[in-house]
Amino acid sequence: LIESDLHNEFSALPQMLFRFLCKYPIKLKSALVGGYTFYRHLQDPKMIKCIESYDYEYDYVFLQKQSQVNALYARNPKQHRLAMTDAKNLVSRVRQYSPHATIFMEQTWSYSGRNYGTFGSFEEFDNQLRKGTQLMAKATKTLVSPIGDAFIIVRSERPDIVLYKDDNKHQNEYGSYLKACVNYLLIFRQPFSQNTDCCELDAAKCKYLQEVAQRVVLSK
């Protein structure tokens, strides 16, 4: 299950992840609505319907809220304490219906738009995102999906591979591909094969993104 604050127009993730997984007998369900906090996830019937699936329990669940919320919580836990409450409530709801699921809290990527999300720099934004996500994962007894760390590596090593749309905030198709790579590896914990689907993107760039995801996930 993927529950995310990303509009379908901004995320090719479910389709890319499905293409990675199509050789396996796996069901993939996603609920994508732009700009959602976990509180709004909990108020949305579409989201709740995805969680309360009576046909089967989920094995893996990826939860992503509005991009900068975890960083805001890290910067001022008292002011943003409801973000932690909402995270606990959403995870509790998932565990009510899928008690054996492995749940990942997404550490999202920083971006340069809106003065780096009001944090002033990529570095500060990334540090607060990492800290906030780790705090929430610890409190909810979930794991961290380190998407943001993968973005940091690509921005540093391969600035020619653009991961963002023109708004300098949402991910483009290469950002979605990198995210799908990280999520895939978190499930299977095995390196990509030589014939992994590149989803009609540049093959050399995709091979590099696969390698970055492997460094971020499999080296830990």
Image (tube, rainbow, N blue to C red):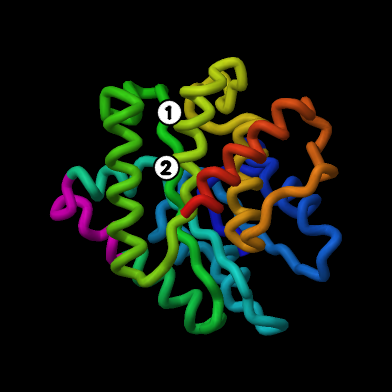
Q: Are marks 1 and 2 in contact (CB under 8 Å)?
A: yes
Q: Which residue is mark 1?
A: 111
Q: Residue at x 65, y 54 (%)?
A: 184
Q: Residue at x 75, y 68 (%)?
A: 27
Instruction: Classify residue 51 by image quadrant.
Output: bottom right
Q: Nearer the viewer, residue 189 or 23?
A: 189
Range covered by the magenta-colored residues? 76-85
Q: Quadrant of the N terminus?
A: bottom right
Q: Which residue is mark 2?
A: 67
Across and down, in percent, residue 67 comes to 42, 42
Q: Residue at x 75, y 26 (%)?
A: 204
Across and down, in percent, residue 149 comes to 45, 40
Q: Nearer the viewer, residue 36 or 112?
A: 112
Q: CA distance from mark 1 to mark 2?
A: 9 Å
Residue 118 lies, with reference to residue 75, above or below; the image says: above
Closer to the N terminus: mark 1 or mark 2? 2
**What's under tag 2, amino acid-wise?**
Ser
